[in-house]
Image (cartoon, coloured by chain):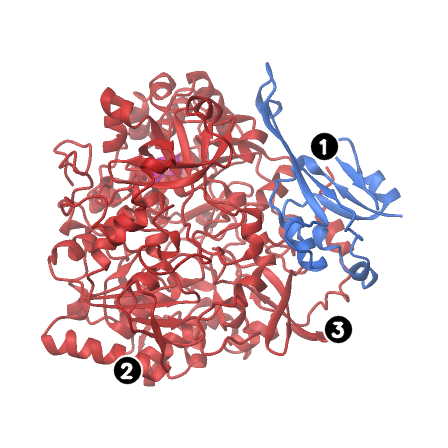
Chain colours: A blue, B red
């Protein structure tokens, strides 16, 4: 089974995945194949440094997502993965992606 | 760590992406591998695959085989097709037929447009004995424009007066280039491996240990030829961060240290960091011993600037200042990423020099993972100074310079002095500006500080030409002739900003629009045929000249060659050979051509200079080929006695407050009236300055201008998310929609810049709504720091109040375009009505 791994620790919320997907699927205003969720920003009391703030983006795949079947059949990357500026998206076999997760930073693995 | 560059490269199906091909057919499309360089666009140039059908751009995607951006594209480039094919894009030259601001136009031919311009200049300037210096040429940023428009100004129109209208203090980038050149002699950028074609795999490259993101949001701005997301790749590889910013950004939330300093107190912080580093002996002693000068003088000077002293000014704890300084200084490889905030304060030139010192004393210069010294690839350097090469010397000597308006200051920048230009418009001194040429710029919506004041200047200009891909508020308000420009998809052009040299290849057509380059060829052959017939009769000749000599001067009759001093700096120098390094590398193998760059090189080529570390050890920086830096002494001058001395700038830095901030801190009544420091101009992902507002997809994500207020402010003023509010001070007012930011200091608000609404009424008083939402209704011109550098436009005082019916009329558009403006008491050289001063320094005047 194919999946998309998101190393969302590093997602910057830049919207590239959303627009890349919308253009490819030709979705009208208000519809998305992948949509950012935003958590924070808020502070953790008593914490300092990089643990002080929570401000996390996580792109969520919608029902419209077909993982770019037509592109991947030709050897191309899914649009969101190809254009992810933060370099936090990976496409492949779920088993391989699961192995790629190493516990060093927060990840989510999406399948259809 | 999940990031693995080799795994990424190995995973690309090279056949699917047609490696090595510049153009192919695919599913009924022609696909072209090229680079974008706007308009619409930004400062950068990312590798793209453009999909066209019947001469029309249908879609675009990033090119995973491009080493600059690795296929990763921002939302604006992904949406390029909407900008290129915008239905209301002007299709042919236009002549104004109604009054200015009525938006009534008549289609004319290019021949008639150029004839009209040439005839007007002849009849109203040349025949009346007025010099060409009475023409002011204005340009925007990005879209590789600073290479081309100054050249147009000098070579086609013959004027030395080129710059940005209303842009007091040159408050973008020039302060950084000059402030750092004074001490280091070259320009430092953070090494995220961008100098190497093999990028993160380069065997010499090491990721920085600590990067300071200072007055900058590189993810959103991608400013200055630098892709901010490169730094996220570094973060994944272990780089840790310090954020210096009044606002919490993504970096602040992910940093080891966030220093939310009061706006425009950066110099106090920088001096305190130097104090910590020098008193705690954290400096790189060996680097200073071998490569720097005046360390003892610097150490003695900064001894007074303790973290406790800075804490009171910056309003952050002294321990935080100390800890962050140690974190940066003790990193083996540290680097500083600086942004526009450095240019938008009266401390600007000394701030830029002082932060350069933070790089230097820690030895973070030109080593892997530090601030590397970069130049434009292949020594291709057209810029402001190019105008000087082709402008008549007598006319050039009349250039509007800083000393005309700030006596005692010395002009050292290629651009005309922005305040001297303001004064010429306002007073006709030392001569009147009769003609305004604006190319790829929407000044009154965007870069012009004191925009209502600039409107008063421009509404009476005798003749105005606006060249742009889109009809803009600036065009509707002032243009007598409108010239349609091509976008990136239609342009054959090139640019270097550091490395690599990149070509953009035209893939589509737009009616009668011309590219900036085609406009230069057409206008030059009309206005200056003797020169243009000889050197640039065609677009092909112009593009070849760029690659061969970068528009520098070669006179076969005298054998003499001259080159401009560089991208921003003033002056020209005689050299034995003006050929670029690209020509030297490729003229013999027959690939020194635009065609070869596009087709054989797939649109790009890296040069060796930016890829080489420790250039100061290798004799690569100095004209004499000796080791050292391109400074008078050959060492990094930590106190730039010689250069700042020549520029009339005190070599030892001291923090001063702007007029507004001084009054805000000292005058309780003023502060009660205007309780907020209004930061402004931070960028958003959807827009490059005033661009992209036509694009439905960008507006879906970001429909309206937003003013950020704190949670506390929202409660005090009973403000709801999305509610319109007025923002006002002594200079004027505008309105934007509330966004509540729980992380914002309650003393601050933040307003957006660059707004207009292409879907709204163009004619006066509405003018696409641009004045209604323009934060530059609240900024002021004529106030600058040392050297005439830096206007404090990002820290203005303001009050806010609800948009209720009883206070909504008249609208700012009505006030500015119909009722004479917010103020009728402007005095040239004075920013405000409440003081005659234009600086807080002794005497009150520059």
Number of residues whose C-alpha sits closer than 10 Å to that of mark 1, classed few (under 14), some (14–19) or many (20 or more): few
Cα–Cα gap, marks 1 and 2: 64 Å
Query: Where residue B517 sits in the image (x, y, percent)?
Result: 41, 73
Residue B705 appears in view: yes
Q: Based on the picture, tell me whether residue B320 belongs to the magenta stretch.
A: no
For the residues beneath circles 1 and 3, the answer to whether they share a chain is: no
Task: Say which residue label 3 marks.
Answer: B27
Task: Say which residue label 2 marks.
Answer: B115
Query: Where residue B19 sits in the image (x, y, percent)?
Result: 71, 67
- Which residue is more in the foreground, B185 or B466? B466
The residue located at (32%, 32%) in the rendering is B798
Cα–Cα gap, marks 3 and 2: 45 Å
Q: Is residue B602 above or below residue B824?
A: below
For the residues beneath circles 1 and 2, the answer to whether they share a chain is: no
Residue, far top: A46
Q: Nearer the viewer, mark 1 or mark 2?
A: 2
Would you say B761 lies left or right of B123 here?
Answer: right
Chain under callout 3: B
Task: Say which residue label 1 marks.
Answer: A105
Cα–Cα gap, marks 1 and 3: 40 Å
The kind of secondary structure element at disc 3 is loop
């Amino acid at each position: 089974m194919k999946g998309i791994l998101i190393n969302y620790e590093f997602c910057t919320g830049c919207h590239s995945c959303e627009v890349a997907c919308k253009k490819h699927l030709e979705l009208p205003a208000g519809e998305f194949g992948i949509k950012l969720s935003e958590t924070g920003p808020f502070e953790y009391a008593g914490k300092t440094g990089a643990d002080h703030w929570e401000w996390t983006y996580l792109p969520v795949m919608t029902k419209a997502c077909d993982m770019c079947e037509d592109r991947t059949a030709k050897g191309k990357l899914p649009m969101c993965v190809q254009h992810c500026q933060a370099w936090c998206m990976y496409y492949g076999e779920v088993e391989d992606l699961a192995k790629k997760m190493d516990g060093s930073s927060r990840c989510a693995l999406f399948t259809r | 760590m999940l990031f693995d560059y080799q795994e990424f490269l190995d995973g690309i199906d090279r056949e699917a992406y047609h490696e090595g091909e510049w153009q192919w057919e695919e599913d009924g499309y022609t696909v072209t591998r090229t680079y974008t360089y706007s308009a619409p666009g930004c400062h950068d140039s990312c590798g793209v695959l453009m999909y066209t059908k019947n001469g029309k751009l249908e879609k675009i995607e990033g090119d995973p085989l491009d080493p600059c951006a690795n296929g990763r594209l921002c939302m604006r480039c992904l949406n390029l097709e909407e900008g290129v094919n915008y239905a209301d894009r002007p299709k042919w030259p236009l002549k104004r037929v109604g009054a200015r601001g009525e938006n009534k136009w008549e289609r004319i031919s290019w021949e008639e447009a150029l004839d009209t311009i040439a005839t007007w200049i002849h009849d109203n300037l040349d025949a009346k004995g007025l010099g060409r210096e009475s023409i002011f040429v204005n340009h925007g940023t990005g879209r590789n424009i600073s290479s081309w428009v100054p050249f147009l100004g000098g070579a086609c129109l013959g004027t030395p007066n080129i710059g940005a209208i209303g842009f007091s203090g040159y408050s973008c980038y020039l302060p950084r280039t000059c402030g750092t050149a004074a001490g280091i002699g070259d320009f430092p950028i953070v090494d995220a491996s961008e100098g190497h074609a093999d990028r993160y795999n380069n065997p010499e490259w090491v990721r920085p240990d600590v990067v300071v993101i200072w007055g900058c949001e590189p993810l959103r701005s991608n400013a200055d030829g630098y892709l901010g997301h490169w730094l996220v790749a570094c973060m994944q590889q272990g780089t840790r961060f310090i954020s210096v910013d009044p606002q919490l950004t993504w970096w602040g939330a992910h940093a080891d240290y966030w220093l939310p300093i009061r706006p425009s107190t950066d110099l106090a912080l920088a001096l305190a960091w130097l104090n910590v580093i020098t008193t705690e002996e954290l400096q790189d002693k060996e680097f200073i011993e071998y490569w720097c000068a005046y360390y003892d003088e610097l150490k003695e000077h900064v001894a007074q600037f303790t973290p406790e002293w800075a804490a009171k000014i910056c309003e952050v704890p002294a321990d935080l200042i100390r800890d962050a300084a140690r974190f940066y200084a003790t990193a083996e490889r540290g680097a500083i990423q600086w942004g526009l905030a450095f240019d938008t304060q009266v401390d600007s030139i000394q701030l830029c020099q002082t932060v350069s010192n933070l790089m230097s004393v820690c030895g973070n210069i030109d080593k892997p993972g530090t601030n590397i010294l970069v130049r434009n690839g292949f020594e291709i350097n057209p810029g402001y100074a190019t105008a000087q090469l082709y402008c008549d010397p007598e006319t050039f000597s009349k250039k509007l310079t800083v000393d005309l308006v700030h006596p005692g200051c010395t002009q050292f920048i290629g651009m005309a002095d922005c305040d001297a230009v303001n004064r010429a418009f306002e007073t006709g001194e030392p001569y009147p500006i009769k003609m305004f040429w604006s190319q790829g710029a929407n000044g009154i919506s965007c870069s012009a500080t004191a925009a209502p004041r600039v409107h008063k200047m421009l509404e009476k200009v005798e003749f105005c030409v606006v060249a742009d891909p889109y009809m803009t508020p600036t065009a509707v308000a002032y243009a007598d002739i409108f010239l349609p420009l091509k976008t990136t998809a239609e342009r054959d052009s090139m640019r270097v900003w550091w490395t690599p040299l990149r070509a953009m290849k035209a893939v589509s057509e737009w009616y009668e629009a011309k590219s900036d380059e085609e406009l230069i060829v057409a206008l030059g052959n009309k206005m200056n045929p003797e020169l243009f017939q000889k050197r640039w009769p065609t677009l092909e000749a112009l593009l070849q000249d760029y690659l061969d000599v970068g528009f520098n001067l070669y006179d076969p009759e005298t054998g003499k060659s001259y080159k401009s001093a560089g991208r921003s700096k003033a002056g020209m120098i005689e050299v034995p050979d003006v050929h670029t390094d690209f020509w030297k590398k490729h003229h013999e193998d027959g690939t020194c051509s635009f065609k070869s760059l596009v087709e054989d090189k797939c649109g790009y080529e890296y040069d060796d200079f930016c890829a080489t570390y420790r250039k100061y050890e290798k004799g690569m920086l100095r004209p004499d080929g000796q080791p050292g830096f391109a400074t008078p002494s050959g060492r990094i001058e930590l106190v730039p006695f010689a250069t700042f001395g020549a520029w009339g700038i005190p070599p030892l830095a001291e923090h001063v407050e702007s007029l507004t901030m001084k009054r805000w801190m000292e005058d309780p009544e003023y502060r009660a009236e205007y309780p907020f420091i209004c930061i402004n101009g931070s960028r958003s992902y959807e827009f490059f300055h005033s661009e992209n507002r036509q694009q439905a997809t960008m507006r879906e994500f970001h429909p309206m201008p937003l003013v950020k207020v704190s949670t506390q402010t929202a409660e005090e003023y009973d403000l709801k998310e999305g509610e319109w509010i007025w923002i006002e001070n002594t200079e004027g007012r505008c309105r934007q929609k509330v966004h509540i930011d729980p992380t914002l200091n309650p003393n601050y608000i933040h307003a957006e810049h660059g707004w207009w609404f292409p879907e709204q009424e163009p004619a006066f008083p509405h003018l696409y709504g641009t004045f209604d939402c323009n934060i530059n209704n609240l900024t002021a011109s004529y106030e600058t720091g040392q050297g005439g550098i830096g206007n404090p436009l990002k820290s203005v005082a303001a009050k806010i109040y609800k948009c209720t019916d009883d206070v909504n009329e008249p609208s700012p558009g009505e006030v500015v375009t119909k009722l004479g403006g917010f103020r009728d008491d402007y005095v040239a050289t004075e920013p405000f009505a409440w003081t005659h001063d234009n600086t807080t320094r002794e005497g009150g005047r520059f």
